[in-house]
Image: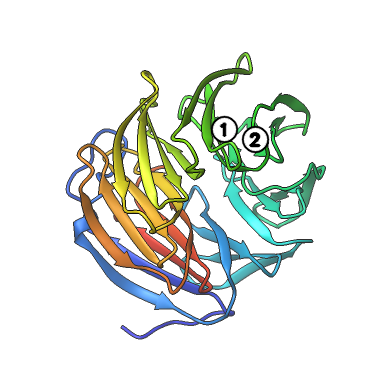
Amino acid sequence: MSPMTKSGWVLAVLVATDVGVPSRYFSFSPERLRQEAEVEVADLQVYSGALSPDGKFIAAGGIEGVVRIWDRATHREEHALELQGQVRHIAYSPDGRHLLVGTADGTLHIRKASSGEAVRTLPAVGYLQCFDISPDGKQVAAPTLGACHVYDLANGKELRVLSRHAAHIEAVVYSKDGKRLATAGREDAVVKIWDLSTGEELRALGVGADPPHAVAIRPDGRMLAAAYASGLVRVWDLAKGTEARTFGEEGGKTYGLSFSPDGRFLAAGGKDGTLRIWDAVDGREVRRIEAHKGKVRCVRFTQDGRTLLTTGEDGRVCLYSAR
């Protein structure tokens, strides 16, 4: 199949045949992935990308400080949002009405997804590497130097500050029920679990001098996966606070993590450009794909489990679909 090119952006779509539909989700089948199409151009480093909840639009941005949004079916660019500073993280609100963008100057931008029009800007509070939106779409957690700020998305009011990390917070993620938050600290090399109703620190998960820089909570809330500077991915039992298993290999640094919505698989992107998928139960690596030339910066399953998105420093966005 010949490549398709549009506006200096890259879109690679890989399709997998599904083997069953357990309740709400397609059962992800990594061993049956096959390439469908590829769109390639541009020397842009893409740090983050997101697929709209209805699956119709893709947003991506990175080092140049521009977020581009295009139609998934036609590859037509719909909007280009020029911002100050590198784009570090992008996410759609669960209802698809808003697009949130975090930039390296510490600003969190909230835009209308349909038009790109500014809704509000949460003030710069220092270094902003990432953020996460609560599953009900009512809150956003945005970490900075040593603290994680929780805001009301509707009015921008700060609801809570979680401030027990030494300095940089590299990753943050809500549990599926929205009751807990996990934050990963670089200098103190720990993952902290927070009770969002009280602001209480429930657990601190660490292994000495190996700092975590990506985290994901399994949809049932029982396990947390963290990627470490050593290249290892450790899975923690959140009830016991103990390490349950270890994936990966030393030296193979991982930048993005995501559980499939059915909890069966863990996907990870590495500095070597590979996308790896492990069986989340027994730790077997079930698929490895040479996805990017350069670091894989972002890995995300969509809410329904049909699509897996990755972005890389080669200016490419890849979609893996289980349609």
Left or right, residue 15 beside residue 217: left
- Mark 2 — residue? 140
- Residue type at tag 1: Ser
Q: What element carries label 2?
A: strand
Tell me the residue at 54%/75% (across/down). 9
| Residue that extends furthest to the bottom in the rendered view of this protein | 2
Point out residue 82 in the picture as x, y percentages from the top left corner. Answer: 75, 65
Q: Which residue is drawn at 37% across and 31% down?
A: 236
Q: Nearer the viewer, residue 25 or 270?
A: 270
Query: Quick one: label 1 or label 2, which is nearer the N terminus?
Result: 1
Residue 237 visible in the snapshot: yes
**Horizontal relation, residue 37 to residue 47: left or right:** left
Q: How far apart are marks 1 and 2 (CA)?
A: 6 Å
For label 1, the residue is 134
Residue at left 49%, top 63%?
311
Give residue 94's quadrant in the image: top right
Image quarter (top left, top right, bottom left or bottom right) of the C terminus: bottom left
Q: Find residue 223 and report its horizontal and vertical position in percent.
A: 36, 30
Res. 192 mark: none
Q: Which amino acid does label 2 sit on?
A: Val
Q: Is residue 72 left or right of residue 8?
A: left
Residue 187: image quadrant is top right
What kind of element bears circle 1? loop
For this rendering, which residue is in front, 161 or 7? Answer: 161
Residue 263: x %, y % from top left: 31, 37
Image marks 1 and 2: residues in contact by CB distance under 8 Å: yes
Residue sticking out furthest to the front: 209
Q: Which residue extends farthest top?
A: 198
Q: Percent x, y for residue 86?
A: 70, 62
Foreground residue among 26 and 134 = 134
Establish if 155 lies above or below 17: above
